Image (cartoon, rainbow, N blue to C red):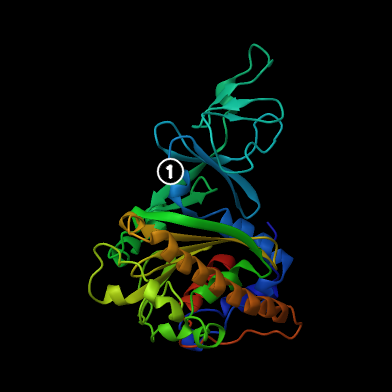
Amino acid sequence: MAPLLDASIIDGLKRVAPPASASPTLPPAVYVDPAVALAERELLFRRGWVGCGRSDRWQEPGSCAAIEIAGAPVLVTRDASGMLRAFANTCRHRGTRLVDRACRASRIVCPFHAWTYALDGRLTGAPRMAADFDRAAHGLHPYLVEERAGFIFVSLADDAAPIDDWLAGFGAVHAPWPLERLVTTRRVERGVPCNWKLFLEVFNEYYHLGCVHRSTFGAIYHEPDPVDAVAGCFTTQFGTNSGTGGLKESDQRHALPAMPGLEGRHLDGTRYTWIYPNMTFAAGRDAAWVLEAQPDGPSACRVALSVCFPRETLEHGGFAAAAGHYYARMDEALEEDIAVLEEQQAGMASPHAAPGRFAALEPSVAGFAFWYAAMMAA
């Protein structure tokens, strides 16, 4: 099979390796080249596990939602027994997309010829097909799907490594936060005019805080700890801050109670985690905010931002008003980042753009780069 990437790009990727202090950053071509975007689809998004946000989007039996994984339409359901399932979102008759939005349903009916599927993927109705037609052989194509810590992960590959290998070490480092019991109170989706990797990189480095977010919340954050040593396909870093990182500096008086069970230093900081390739989140003292990014070609992406609180906090008097300040902080931070990301995307397209070097405040970006380079240049 012919290589998916140009030899010069592969050579540049092979130069990206630990230690971060001596490594170049990823080649600019990986942020702008359509061939790289196609290779990522095959090598990253259709082989391993892909984070698809919080699993409480499918809270009750009958919950369904259409999602997309690097251009592949996927249908996720929670069946009558409460089991989460994922399928190719394509009718087994003539390929029509079955669901185009979130919904509640007892069955899935194709809008074209009314082929009908149970929530576990079985074909239960195929009007006017021949008497010897085998329904059992025409169920929906299943994908692997798992829930961990309140997150959902889908793999389009039949032979993906076990999810607990992908997340090796995740449980221990995140044990102080009750991630599994958090409730999503707001989820918004939007398009962003930059490569998906750039969007996730900026969320996972402290280097830009004093410049891009200097008037909102950049001064809240202290010098972070080093990244944690983990075996799984993720990077994570904790740092303390003044007050809560979930609010702007001017809104700290609206802080909600701390998460139940948090103790010691964890009450005074935020853990930023990037689960490769495309989902990242911050777990603070009082809230968690989650970002998913899906590529939309080489120079744009679709993102979703979810904000989550403990169920106990939802019962707090004045929650709705206070939560509004958290949402405003997230929205403002996103706008500040996007303004810079648009300029970064434009600069990456220069014929003279060249790899840079990692700063000391970018270890998580470096960690992802090492993983990405190894996956893409293998």
On the rendered structure, is 378 left or right of 288?
right
Q: Please state if 25 lies on the left or on the right of 225 as rendered.
A: right
Q: Nearer the viewer, residue 184 or 340?
A: 184
Q: Is residue 4 visible?
A: no
In the picture as drawn, the residue positioned furthest to the top comes out as 131
Residue at left offset 67%, top offset 85%: 354
Relative image position of residue 328 (x, y in whole percent): 52, 69
Q: Quadrant of residue 318?
A: bottom left
Vertical position of residue 326 compared to residue 2: above or below: below
Q: Is residue 6 left or right of residue 154?
A: right
> Which one is nearer the viewer's eye here, 51 or 247?
247
Residue furthest to the right in view is 351
Q: Is residue 65 above or below residue 214?
A: above
Pinpoint residue 224: horizontal percent, then vertical percent.
38, 83
Foreground residue among 255 and 345: 255
Please name whichever residue, 183 or 235, is drawn nearer the observer in this view of the structure: 183
Indicate the secondary structure of the residue bearing disc 1. loop
Q: Where is residue 234 in the image (x, y as percent from the top left)?
A: 43, 66
Q: Quadrant of the C terminus?
A: bottom right
Quarter of the rendering containing residue 47: bottom right
What residue is rendered at 45% in x and 55% in y? Answer: 185
Residue at the spot x=66%, y=52% of the render?
A: 71
Q: Name the residue under label 1.
A: 59
Dot 1 amino acid type = Gln
How many tags in the picture?
Answer: 1
Is residue 342 in sight in this rendering? Answer: yes
Instruction: Indicate the quadrant containing the N terminus: top left, top right, bottom left or bottom right.
Output: bottom right
| Number of residues whose C-alpha sits closer than 10 Å to that of mark 1, classed few (under 14), some (14–19) or many (20 or more) | some
**Where 320 sits versus 209, above or below?**
above
